[in-house]
Image: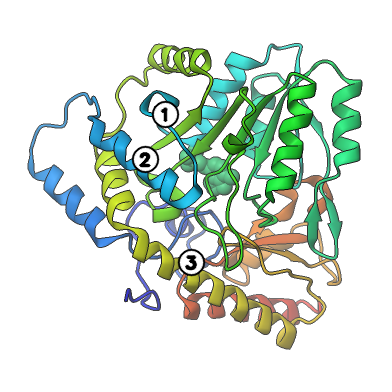
Amino acid sequence: MFDLDKKVDRLGTDCTKWDRYKSRYGLDDVIALWVADMDFNTVPEVSEALKKRAEHMIYGYTDPGDDLYDEIIAFEKRHHDVDIEKDDIILSTGVVYSLYTLVEMLVREDEKIILMPPIYPPLFNTPKHLNREVVYSKLINEDEHYHIDFEDLKAKIENDPKIKCFILCNPHNPTGACYSREEIDKIAKICEENDLWLISDEIHGDLTMPGYKKYSALRSGYKKTITLNAPTKTFNLAGLKISYCLTKDKALADDFRKEAKASGLSSINIFGFEALKAAYHYGDEWLKEVREYIYQNFLFLDAYLKEHLPMVKFHIPEATYLAWLDLNALDLKEDYVDRLMKEGHVQFNPGAAFSEDYSKYIRVNCATDRNTLKEGLDRLVKWLKDNKAL
Ligand SMILES: Cc1ncc(COP(=O)(O)O)c(C=O)c1O
């Protein structure tokens, strides 16, 4: 049993989530329920492996052994029933780095990318930064159940031959949808019929809730598929900058490796290797408990909202540790998320970052101890009352 109720003080660790308030705003008591990492200590064996490696006092260029690939192959098989070989794996420093590289490689400047908002902002900001046009096929929101609009998706792709790439997020950040086998196969079929690349960001794929399991896009069998995976969300290792892509397209894998080398990525962080190996080897029990704890946090959040903010709409996610809350029924001004942080001392992600239609939504990171989550919610309610938004 891991003590996930224990509050871990992250202040002073140079972390993105908690350490910015003092220097930027002179605040030292903000509850941070935003950026997607966890407030839980990672798997103890990971920490042991890092300490052991740190004792060897040379941290030179790296070249991973088969043991690293073997752990990835075993983990993908055990958790997702994905069959891969060493050659199908491309190591990377992060999912967004991989996305950047793939967009550069696969989509010309006069070509387009399609994706389904509301969605994790870098999935559209990175292509836009690279001057690739992004086409949006909005998810259908049926009372906080989000569905793919296949009719719209198909029509947009078929009517625009410039669309060359589909970026999928499965499970979907921020809606928490974990797409079914039928849905993924259908997406792959549309991509195949129209000769699109299918890039599937599956970084939240290990964090499914009871009754759900990620069906990897790789299992559809469509060759022009590449998935973006990592142990970083799953085991709280984002600062170690380690991830990997999986594809059955050998030419794509070779091209990616060449591109990564040319852009300076021939050596990945040595501590990232150690953490991945230990997490994938020893982390199953920890992961099981963390997923259950997050699920209990979602149930807690659901009950809390029903009691204190019944007008807020929320559907328990099928995956991820992110709750997506509809605050449209409240009387809120545009800058409410910023004011919640500065006046209410609680920080959420603004919905507008995920899609302009969702400015009255907030994303709440529930990967924290329950008392911290409760304190954050209490502050939300108090600020709303103080500002007569209820
Ligand atoms: C869907 C999704 N993709 C990618 C990332 C970032 O991955 P990385 O840190 O490996 O670039 C995140 C982080 O929140 C995410 O939610």
Q: Which residue is mark 3?
A: 291
Q: Amino acid at mark 2?
A: Ile
Looking at the image, residue 121 sits to the left or right of residue 52; the answer is: right
Q: Quadrant of the N terminus?
A: bottom left
The residue at 42%/50% (across/down) is: 78
Drawn side of residue 67 relative to residue 312, left or right = left
- Mark 1 and mark 3 lie on one chain; the one further toward the N terminus is 1
Location of residue 178 with respect to 252 vertically, above or below: below
Q: Position of residue 116 (x, y in %)?
A: 76, 41
Determine contact: label 2, label 3, CB under 8 Å. no
Say if 155 sits above or below 39 in the image.
above
Tell us which disc is closer to us: 1 or 3: 1
- Residue position marked by numbered label 2 in the rendering: 72
Label for residue 199? none
* Comes first in the chain, label 2 or label 1: 2
Give the residue at the far bottom of this rendering: 307
Q: Does the Cβ of the disc 3 residue fall within 8 Å of ligand 1?
A: no
Residue 135: image location, x then y, percent: 81, 30
Q: Which residue is mark 1?
A: 89
Report how far apart the C-alphas of labels 2 and 1 lie in the structure: 9 Å
